[in-house]
Amino acid sequence: MKQVLDSAVGSTHPPSPDEKGQQEKIFDEKSTSSYNQDHLIKGQFNPDADPHTHYEFGGPWGSLGLMILFPCLMYYFFICLWCYDGKLSRPDSLNPKEVIRWSSEFWQLIKLHTRPTWSATYLYMGLLFHQVFLAWFMPGVRQEGLPIPSLNGGKLTYYCNALCSWYATLATVFVLHSVLGVVRLGDVFDQLGHLMTIATIFGFAISLFYYILPIWQGQAVRMSGNHVYDFFMGAALNPRIGPIDLKLFAEVRIPWVGLFIIAVSGSVKQYETIGYVTPNSLFMVYGTGLYINACAKGEECIPLTWDMAYEKWGWLLSFWNFAGVAFTYCHSVIYITNQPVSKYQFSNYSYVALYLTYTLAYYVFDTSNSQKARFKMENDSQSQITSRIYGFPQLSYGTLKNPKVLIVEKSDRKLLIDGWWAVCRHPSSAGGTAETSCSDSPVREDGPAWSTARTAQSEHLSDGRVRERSGGTIRCLSPADEIGDASTRKAGRGCKNYSVPARAGHPQVHRHLCARGPRNTPSQ
């Protein structure tokens, strides 16, 4: 039995030193042969330039566990919110008969409230095809992405029209609900469980389709050879249908539009039930609306992210975007809509503090992400800064003029250390953590903990990427490294804290970092 499982999922034992050395030798030979060929054409597909080097997310067994755990948690939390007033349901004892009784009861509730229905299928697929139609035909702007190793450093151009699509979606929802009465938002809330199942089925189906297709077409990238892990991470890097990039489409159109519609449907359902809408319910509409609006008006920033340039289109991205986001982040909406107002009512001062805190957190989130993206447009992508003046709201602090930078030794990369990025390492994640804390305040105590853990993981991954690109060393360098010759270069040791005024044609360089030596990073 163990041999069968190991052949399907892969052994969890780390390789021996001899095996690891042999793997590194093979990787070095492949990398050298692929990068040193003179006939390489930028933009030509070359999977050897981006080989698999190490496992993430705990390898095959960790990936398998996450693919089982995430859907189970979605159903468990939904039933707890829908049927147990938000309390965590559990058997009264560990007696086998009691465990079987509880499991049978819970399974019956799952079948009753989350079984797939035709009406839920029409709603979900209608939203999906509507978003595809808008992504195909609505006007937008073009944004060049980051260099892609498997394209020999070539770049892809992305068509960004989420803003016009977002406005068109709002108009469509209004017409269908208020004018034609074809789709009642209150009914959408009643079918959340059934919609979740349809989304889950679709998330698994599209993951499987885009795992098989790239392998069949010979377009697979960074494959480990383990089917479970490769299905989790994906085979294709940039799948496209006509002008639509699937990863860019899935980042915004379905998850956040869907979550906003769920929040609005919760408010409509509450109005139909008690005759008014509470500030808590309006807050969920306000929060989700701000978030999707920020994603839509700043969609041109997304092609410059790690997701677009590196992450493959696997189960992790497709399932989370098509099912996980909308039906996990809506827990507060379910609780507020189904529970008596007395259970979560705040004082007026608390409401003012809640709205102000969220608005300030959103400002940090919006402007810090914009600062990073505009900086990448000028440096990593070396393209003109793309901005749409008709997006609302326009926040002036989103673009930094002549920002302070840090030069990374051996790679000539520039790291932004100005604006919000001079205050902390991940200001965008800090703003997102504050937003999550506000939106989860009525129901989930784990919201801040979840966001904090996610921020810590992001910091760890970001630090590792910088070290990998810089050869394992981050140093403070003098301006001579940027504009002088090699004989004048010198590296700062220890803690430095000084600024150098900008010179003609060069950005201002700021030094404030403790030089760190190399750190060994395990390959698996």
Image (cartoon, rainbow, N blue to C red):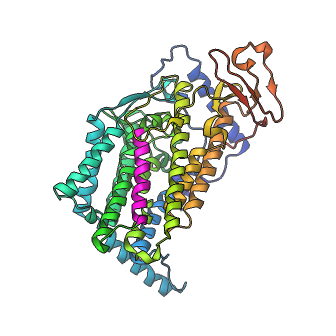
> What's the magenta region?
279-297
* Camera sees residue 345: yes
Between 444 and 179, the one nearer to me in the picture: 179
Relative placement, left or right, of 417 versus 313 is right
Q: Quadrant of residue 52?
A: top right
Residue in the image at 71% along x and 29% along y:
510
Please check the rendered image and state whether residue 228 is part of the magenta-colored stretch, yes or no.
Answer: no
User: Going 51% across and 23% down the picture, which residue do you hit?
Assistant: 152
Percent x, y of residue 329: 45, 59
> Looking at the image, which residue sits at the far right?
494
Q: Which of the image's four quarters has the C terminus? A: top right
Instruction: Please tell me whether residue 513 is drawn above or below residue 491 in the rendered image.
Output: below
Q: Is residue 280 highlighted in magenta? A: yes
Expressed as whole percent of the image width and height from the top left, the position of residue 204 reads: 38, 53
Residue 138 relative to residue 179: left or right: right
Q: Position of residue 333 (x, y in %)?
A: 40, 64
Q: Nearer the viewer, residue 289 or 9?
A: 289
Location of residue 22 by image quarter: top right
